[in-house]
C-alpha cells in the first residue's frame, strides 16, 4: 500500500484505480520505446525523414514541447524574482511540467540525431556561432537546473521527509531556489531565443530567414516572447485538466486568472510584433533574397490561411479573451483561450520547422510533403506517455498544489457555516 | 586551418557547367559515387534518401507540345564562399571552409548527424547516411583507398574529390613543387563528362576555364541573390534556361526533377 | 570548450559564450554545494527538528498560524512571526507585562466535558507541562489530544536520556491510519517515560524553567473553543457527519465515532503536523 507516501490530508484514488489509469500510458510508453529502439538500433531509415525533410515530426515536437514547458521558468521568474505570491499555488506543477517537457525533448533529440553517442562533441568542439550550440548548452544547463528545482518537490514527499538528511537538504535548497530561478530565467531566455534563431539565421531558406538585431534574427525575440506567453497558458491548461481528471479543486480561481492575464498580455505583445515582423518579411526580407513571399503560399495545403490562423485566430483572439476580465473570469473562456494560445504557438513551430523544409528553394525543385512513419509517431507518443506518467506519479506522491488541502477545508467550511452560526 | 597545410598560394577552386553541352547522361553521378565510395542504394531507399553528391535535374520551360524545351542541370555542392550557410550552423565544427582551397569540407568523424546543415543548405546538396554503408560481396575490392567510407548517421557532401586533391598534392610534393599545377587536380565528375560540359579550375587564376566562364554574360549562379557567393558557374546561351534558373519558383509549379 | 581542442579560437564570441557557460556552471554547482554544506552543518548542530517544525508551521494555513493573543481577543488578526515560540517574542512580553494578573476562580476549566486543569500549561499541539516538586516536569497529552487518539494502536516513546526540543518531536502515536508526531512543549532531557496508561508520557529535566511559549490560565478556554472549531472543520472536510456541531460532547475515543474519516488528516491538522 502506498498510503504512507501520499501527502497527508489530500485524497488520492486507490492504488488499483491509479494502476488502471497508468496502464494505457505504460502500454503507449512501451510501444514508443520499441519504436525509438528500432530507430536507434536500425538507424534513422526507420523514419520517413529524408534528405529534404531532414527535420520532421520530432523537431516540431521538441520545439513545441519546449515552448509549452516555458511555464516553469516564467512562473519561477514571476514568483521568485518579481514576487508574485499568488503563483506559489502552481509553481510546483509548473516545475514538473518543465522537467517533463525538457527531458522529453532531450530524449526525442537523442533519437533524432544520427550519432547519439557523439552528443558530447558539441561540448568538446563547440561552434559558438551556431544557434544549435547555444540551444544545446542552454537546454542541458537548464534541464540540470530544473532537476535541482524538482528535487525539493520530491524530497518533500511525506515519507522521504522522515529522513533527516533529505529534510534538511530540501530546506536548505529551497532557501536558495531564487538563485536557480534567476539562472533558469537567463538560460531559458537564451535557448528559447536560440530555438527561434535556429531558423531565422537560415540564409539559405528565405521562408525562414529574418533580419534582426546584431547576431540575433527577429525570430530569436519572437520565440522568447511566444514561449513566455504560452508557458503560463499551458500551466493553466494542465491545472484545469488535472482538476477535471482528479475531480478536485487544486488552485484558487484568482491564480488561474492571473496566469491567464499574464499570458494574454504577453500574447498581445507577441501578436503585435509578429505581425510587424511578418510585414517586414513579406515586403522587404524575402523579396530582397529574390523570393516574393506570395510564392510560399502557392503550395497546397500551405495557403495564406495558415498565416491567418496562426496570427489572428490562434493569437489575437485568445489574447483578447485573456485580456477581457469578464471573459477571463469564466472558466470555459479562460481554458479555451489558453488552449488556443497553445495551439497557436504549436502551429508557429510547425510552420517554422516543417513548412520551411517543404517549400523548395531551387526554381526547378519540387514542393515535397512528408508523412511521419509509425516509428516516428511511436517515439512521439513515448514522449507524451512519459510526460503523463511522470506528472501522474508526481501528482500522486508529491505536493504539486500547496493549496489543495486548504481548498478542501474551505469547501467544508462553507458547508458547515450554518451549523457553526447556530452554535455560537 | 592547420598551419602545415597552408600553401604559398591560396586557391579558390570552382567549376563551370555548360548546360548547353550537358546531355543528362549521368556519367558524372556514377563517377562521383565510384570515386567517393558512395555505397549502392540500400534496399528500400528512395530518391529522397539516396546519396548523390552530384545530381542531374531535368528542367523544362513549362510549355506543352512542340514548344516544350528541356535542359539538364547537374547540381552539386555549390561551395559557397561567403556566409557559407552550412558552416556556421554546425554545432560542433564538423563543417569548415578550407582557407587554402575554399572547398567546403565535411568531417564525418565529427558529425553528430543533427542534419541542421541540411536544413540550412539552399541547394539540398547535403546527404545523410540513413543506412549503414554496404557493398555487395566482392565489390569492396573496387573501393577507392584514398577515400574513407562514411558510417551511418552522419552527413556527407561533395568536397571536389578531396582524395584527389590530396593525391595531387602528394604528386606535386614528390616532384619538388609546393603547389598543384593547373589541371593536375580534377574531380571525378569533370573527368568523366563525355561532352566536357563540366570544367574545373582555380577562380583566382584568371586563365582557368571557370574564371573565364564566370565573366561570361551567359553565365549565372544558382540562387545568387542569397548572397552566399557559390563557386559553381552555370552557362547557357538559351535565354529561357537562364530565366527558369533565376525564377523564384517553377513556371508551372509541377514536379520536374529527376535524379 | 578548452583551448587545446582542435578548432578552438580565441575570439570575442568564444570568450563571451564560454564565459557565460562557465559562469552558469559555477553558479549552479556552488548553489548545490552551498546547500549541501549548509545541510551538513544543520545536521551536525541537530537542527533537523527545528527545520521540520519551521516547514510545518510555514505550511499551516494562515488562520492556524494565528497569534495566541488573537485567541484572547487582544488582536483582531496577527500571524505568529516566531513559529509559536513566544520566548523570543517582544510583543508577547509587552502584552504579558501590561496585562492584569490572571484571576483563576476554578482550578480546572471544563469545556464540553473535557478537563483542562489550570495547574499546568499547554502547548498548541495538545500537550501539557506540569512542574513537579523535584525540578523536573511531566509532559502529557491534554484531554482533547487524548480523545483524538483514544486508545492508541501504538506509541513510540523516545529512550530516557534522549533530548527533546520545543516544537520538535516528543513521541509518535499511531491510531488507525494516523501516524502523528507529538510536538514537545519544552527543551530538556528525558528522565523517564510513561505512556497512554500512565498519568504522563514523559518526565523531562528542562534546560530552563521557561514556559512562556505555552498557554495557561484564561487563554485555555478561547484556545480550546478554537480547537474545537478546527476539529469540526477537519472532520467535515474528511467527510465525517458533523455531530459535534449539535453541541455534543467529544467522546473518549473520537476516532471510533467516525470510522469513515481520514484519521491521519484529522490528527495531522490537530497536532499541527503537515
Image (cartoon, coloured by chain):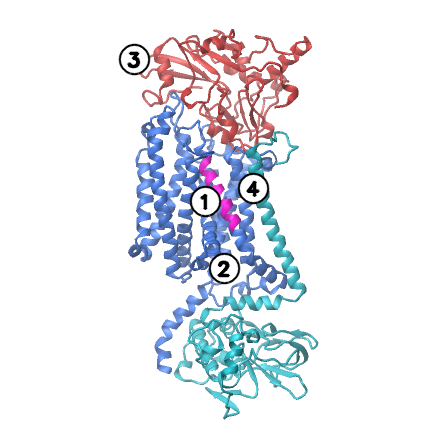
**Labels 4 and 3 touching (C-beta < 8 A):** no
Disc 4: host chain? C
Disc 2: host chain? A
Q: CA distance from mark 2 to mark 4?
A: 38 Å
Tell me if mark 4 has few (under 14), some (14-19) or many (20+) residues whose alpha carbon lies within 10 angstroms of its own. Answer: few
Position above or below: B172 against A4: above
Residue nearest the observer in this picture, A337 or B229: B229
Q: Are marks 3 and 2 on the same chain?
A: no
* Disc nearest the viewer among 1 and 4: 4
State the red chain.
B
Disc 1: host chain? A
State the cyan chain.
C
Give the residues drawn in magenta, as a range: A182-198
Helix, strand or loop at label 3? It is helix
* Residue of label 1: A65
Residue A24 visible at all: no
Residue at the image position 35 percent from the left and 79 percent from the top: A421
Q: Quadrant of residue A248?
A: bottom left
The disc placed on residue C20 is: 4
Amino acid at each position: 500500500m502506498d498510503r504512507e507516501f501520499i501527502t497527508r490530508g489530500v485524497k488520492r484514488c486507490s492504488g488499483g484505480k491509479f494502476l488502471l489509469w497508468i496502464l494505457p500510458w505504460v502500454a503507449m510508453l512501451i510501444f514508443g520505446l520499441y519504436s525509438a529502439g528500432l530507430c536507434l538500433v536500425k538507424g534513422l531509415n526507420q523514419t520517413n525523414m529524408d534528405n529534404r525533410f531532414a527535420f520532421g515530426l520530432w523537431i516540431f515536437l521538441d520545439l513545441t514541447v519546449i515552448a509549452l514547458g516555458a511555464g516553469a521558468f516564467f512562473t519561477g521568474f514571476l514568483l521568485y524574482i518579481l514576487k508574485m505570491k499568488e503563483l506559489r499555488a502552481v509553481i510546483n506543477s509548473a516545475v514538473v511540467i518543465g522537467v517533463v517537457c525538457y527531458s522529453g525533448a532531450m530524449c526525442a533529440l537523442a533519437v533524432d540525431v544520427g550519432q547519439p553517442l557523439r552528443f558530447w562533441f558539441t561540448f568538446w568542439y563547440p561552434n559558438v556561432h551556431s544557434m544549435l550550440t547555444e540551444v544545446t548548452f542552454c537546454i542541458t544547463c537548464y534541464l540540470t537546473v530544473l532537476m535541482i528545482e524538482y528535487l525539493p518537490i520530491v524530497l518533500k514527499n511525506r515519507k522521504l521527509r522522515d529522513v533527516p538528511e533529505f529534510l534538511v537538504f530540501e530546506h536548505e535548497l529551497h532557501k536558495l531556489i531564487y538563485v536557480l530561478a534567476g539562472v533558469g530565467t537567463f538560460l531559458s531566455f537564451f535557448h528559447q531565443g536560440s530555438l527561434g534563431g535556429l531558423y531565422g539565421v537560415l540564409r539559405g531558406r528565405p521562408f525562414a530567414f529574418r533580419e534582426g538585431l546584431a547576431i540575433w534574427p527577429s525570430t530569436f525575440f519572437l520565440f522568447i516572447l511566444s514561449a513566455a506567453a504560452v508557458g503560463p497558458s499551458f500551466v493553466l491548461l494542465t491545472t484545469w485538466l488535472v482538476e477535471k481528471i482528479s475531480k478536485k479543486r487544486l488552485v484558487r480561481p484568482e491564480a488561474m486568472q492571473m496566469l491567464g492575464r499574464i499570458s494574454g498580455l504577453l500574447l498581445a505583445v507577441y501578436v503585435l510584433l509578429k505581425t510587424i515582423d511578418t510585414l517586414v518579411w513579406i515586403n522587404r526580407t524575402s523579396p530582397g533574397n529574390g523570393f516574393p513571399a506570395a510564392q510560399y503560399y502557392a503550395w497546397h495545403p500551405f495557403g495564406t490561411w495558415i498565416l491567418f490562423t496562426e496570427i489572428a485566430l490562434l493569437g489575437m483572439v485568445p489574447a483578447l479573451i485573456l485580456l477581457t476580465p469578464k471573459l477571463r473570469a469564466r472558466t470555459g473562456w479562460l481554458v479555451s483561450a489558453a488552449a488556443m494560445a497553445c495551439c497557436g504557438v504549436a502551429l508557429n513551430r510547425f510552420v517554422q520547422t516543417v513548412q520551411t523544409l517543404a517549400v523548395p528553394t531551387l526554381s526547378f525543385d519540387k514542393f515535397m510533403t512528408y508523412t511521419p512513419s509509425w516509428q516516428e509517431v511511436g517515439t512521439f507518443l513515448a514522449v507524451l506517455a512519459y510526460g503523463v506518467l511522470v506528472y501522474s506519479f508526481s501528482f500522486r506522491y508529491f505536493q504539486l498544489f500547496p493549496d489543495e488541502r486548504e481548498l478542501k477545508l474551505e469547501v467544508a467550511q462553507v458547508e458547515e457555516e450554518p451549523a457553526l452560526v447556530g452554535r455560537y | 586551418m592547420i598551419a602545415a597545410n597552408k600553401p604559398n598560394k591560396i586557391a579558390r577552386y570552382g567549376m563551370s557547367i555548360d548546360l548547353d553541352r550537358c546531355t543528362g547522361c549521368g556519367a558524372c553521378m556514377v563517377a562521383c559515387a565510384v570515386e567517393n565510395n558512395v555505397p549502392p542504394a540500400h534496399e528500400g531507399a528512395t530518391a529522397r534518401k539516396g546519396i548523390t553528391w552530384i545530381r542531374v535535374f531535368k528542367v523544362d520551360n513549362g510549355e506543352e507540345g512542340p514548344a516544350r524545351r528541356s535542359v539538364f542541370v547537374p547540381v552539386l555542392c555549390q561551395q559557397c564562399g561567403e556566409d557559407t550557410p552550412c558552416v556556421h550552423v554546425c554545432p560542433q565544427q564538423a563543417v569548415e571552409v578550407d582557407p587554402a582551397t575554399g572547398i567546403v569540407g565535411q568531417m564525418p568523424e565529427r558529425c553528430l548527424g543533427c542534419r541542421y546543415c541540411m536544413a540550412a543548405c539552399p541547394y539540398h546538396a547535403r546527404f545523410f547516411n540513413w543506412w549503414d554503408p554496404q557493398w555487395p560481396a566482392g565489390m569492396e575490392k573496387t573501393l577507392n583507398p584514398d577515400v574513407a567510407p562514411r558510417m551511418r548517421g552522419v552527413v556527407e557532401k561533395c568536397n571536389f574529390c578531396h582524395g584527389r586533391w590530396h593525391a595531387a598534392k602528394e604528386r606535386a610534393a614528390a616532384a619538388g613543387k609546393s603547389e598543384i599545377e593547373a589541371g593536375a587536380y580534377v574531380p571525378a565528375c569533370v573527368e568523366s563528362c563525355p561532352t566536357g560540359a563540366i570544367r574545373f579550375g582555380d577562380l583566382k587564376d584568371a586563365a582557368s576555364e571557370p574564371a573565364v566562364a564566370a565573366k561570361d554574360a551567359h553565365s549565372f549562379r544558382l540562387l545568387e541573390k542569397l548572397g552566399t557567393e557559390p563557386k559553381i558557374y552555370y552557362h547557357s546561351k538559351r535565354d529561357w534556361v537562364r530565366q527558369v534558373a533565376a525564377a523564384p519558383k517553377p513556371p508551372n509549379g509541377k514536379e520536374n526533377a529527376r535524379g | 570548450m578548452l583551448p587545446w581542442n582542435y578548432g578552438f579560437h580565441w575570439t570575442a564570441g568564444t570568450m563571451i559564450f564560454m564565459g557565460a557557460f562557465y559562469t552558469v556552471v559555477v553558479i549552479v554547482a556552488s548553489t548545490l554545494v552551498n546547500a549541501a554544506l549548509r545541510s551538513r552543518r544543520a545536521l551536525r548542530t541537530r537542527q533537523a527538528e527545528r527545520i521540520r517544525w519551521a516547514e510545518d508551521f510555514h505550511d499551516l494555513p494562515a488562520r492556524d498560524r494565528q497569534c495566541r493573543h488573537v485567541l484572547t481577543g487582544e488582536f483582531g488578526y496577527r500571524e505568529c512571526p516566531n513559529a509559536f515560540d513566544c520566548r523570543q517574542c517582544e510583543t508577547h512580553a509587552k502584552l504579558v507585562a501590561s496585562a492584569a494578573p490572571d484571576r483563576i476562580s476554578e482550578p480546572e476549566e471544563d469545556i464540553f466535558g473535557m478537563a483542562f486543569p489550570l495547574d499546568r500549561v499547554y502547548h498548541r499541539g495538545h500537550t501539557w507541562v506540569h512542574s513537579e516538586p523535584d525540578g523536573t516536569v511531566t509532559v502529557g497529552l491534554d484531554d482533547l489530544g487524548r480523545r483524538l487518539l483514544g486508545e492508541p494502536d501504538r506509541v513510540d516513546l523516545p529512550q530516557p536520556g534522549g533530548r527533546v526540543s520545543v516544537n520538535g518531536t516528543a513521541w509518535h502515536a499511531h491510531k488507525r491510519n494516523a501516524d502523528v508526531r507529538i510536538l514537545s512543549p519544552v527543551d530538556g532531557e528525558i528522565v523517564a517515560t510513561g505512556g497512554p496508561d500512565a498519568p504522563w508520557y514523559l518526565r523531562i529535566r528542562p534546560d530552563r524553567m521557561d514556559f512562556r511559549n505555552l498557554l495557561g490560565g484564561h487563554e485555555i478556554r478561547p484556545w480550546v473553543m478554537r480547537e474545537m472549531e478546527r476539529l469540526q472543520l477537519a472532520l467535515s472536510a474528511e467527510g465525517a457527519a458533523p455531530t459535534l456541531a449539535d453541541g455534543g460532547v467529544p467522546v473518549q475515543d473520537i476516532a471510533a465515532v467516525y470510522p469513515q474519516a481520514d484519521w491521519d488528516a484529522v490528527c495531522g491538522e490537530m497536532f499541527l503536523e503537515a
